[in-house]
């Protein structure tokens, strides 16, 4: 990306594209019902960020209880949701920043800072949920935090990594814009 500059059409949209993938992963984590699942027989428990469902007997009907009745459930959902909303805002700002012909590098660094704040909120929600869930909700058998919870962590890790990219990108402003003459380490005789 630095070699060809951000005007190189295939490289210009990589960071907004990665933010878009992070938004998709965040949607999957928010909507997914697989935050916690029974790992072994009997498969009697599953939970999402919003509710916990269990079967009285294997093969019976699922009965669901909202986690919004617990203070920790509301806290976990609110902090993760705030992190997701900040991620969506960063995605929109990145689209705007990279669509403008003259990049504003301070603007890009601000997106990186906002991504770090989003990561903090997301991680708070991702830590509150398993700690309080495992102590407050009775679980039967062996349970595991599953695929939707993993998508939540993937979103948080992407927020941190993209925050570093957005914050470090202005350090290479001259190279990105092509204002620096390339230096060659090998000269032909």
Image (cartoon, rainbow, N blue to C red):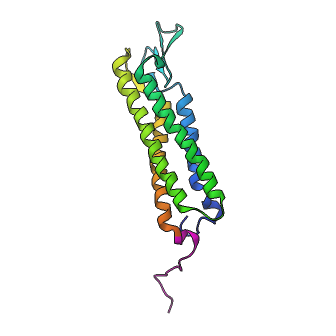
Does residue 147 appear in this view? Answer: no
Image quarter for residue 20?
A: top right
Number of marks = 0
Seen from the viewer's position, the closer of residues 1 and 185 is 1
Seen from the viewer's position, the closer of residues 79 and 30 is 79
Question: Height in image: 84 above or below 168?
Answer: above
Question: Height in image: 70 above or below 101?
Answer: above
Residue 33: % across, % down = 53, 24
Task: Decide whether the magenta segment is chiefly helix, strand or loop.
Answer: loop
Looking at the image, residue 8 sits to the left or right of residue 115; the answer is: right
Residue 186: % across, % down = 47, 84
Q: Residue at x 57, y 34 (%)?
A: 27
Does residue 5 appear in this view? Answer: yes
Q: Is residue 188 magenta?
A: yes
Q: Is residue 67 magenta?
A: no
Farthest-out residue, left: 135
Image quarter for residue 153?
A: top left
Q: Residue at x 60, y 61 (%)?
A: 11
Residue 119: % across, % down = 45, 42
Seen from the viewer's position, the closer of residues 99 and 45 is 99
Farthest-out residue, bottom: 189
Residue 44: % across, % down = 46, 14
Q: Quadrant of the N terminus?
A: bottom right
Q: Residue at x 33, y 20 (%)?
A: 135
Seen from the viewer's position, the closer of residues 45 and 182 is 182
The stretch of residues the image draws in magenta is: 174-189
């Amino acid at each position: 990306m630095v070699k060809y500059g951000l005007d190189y059409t295939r490289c210009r949209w990589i960071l907004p594209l990665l933010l878009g993938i992070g938004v998709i992963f965040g949607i999957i984590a928010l909507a997914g019902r697989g935050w916690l699942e029974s790992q072994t027989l009997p498969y009697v428990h599953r939970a999402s960020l919003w509710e916990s469902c269990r079967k009285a007997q294997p093969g019976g009907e699922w009965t669901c209880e909202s986690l919004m009745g617990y203070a920790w459930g509301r806290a976990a959902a609110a902090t993760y949701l705030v992190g997701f909303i900040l991620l969506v805002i960063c995605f929109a700002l990145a689209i705007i920043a990279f669509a403008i012909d003259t990049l504003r590098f301070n603007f890009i660094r601000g997106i990186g800072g906002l991504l770090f704040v989003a990561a903090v909120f997301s991680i708070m929600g991702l830590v509150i949920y398993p700690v309080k869930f495992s102590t407050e909700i009775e679980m039967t058998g062996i349970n595991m935090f599953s695929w939707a919870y993993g998508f939540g962590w993937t979103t948080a890790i992407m927020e941190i990594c993209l925050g570093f990219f957005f914050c470090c990108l202005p350090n290479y402003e001259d190279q990105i814009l092509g204002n620096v003459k390339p230096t060659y380490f090998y000269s032909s005789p």
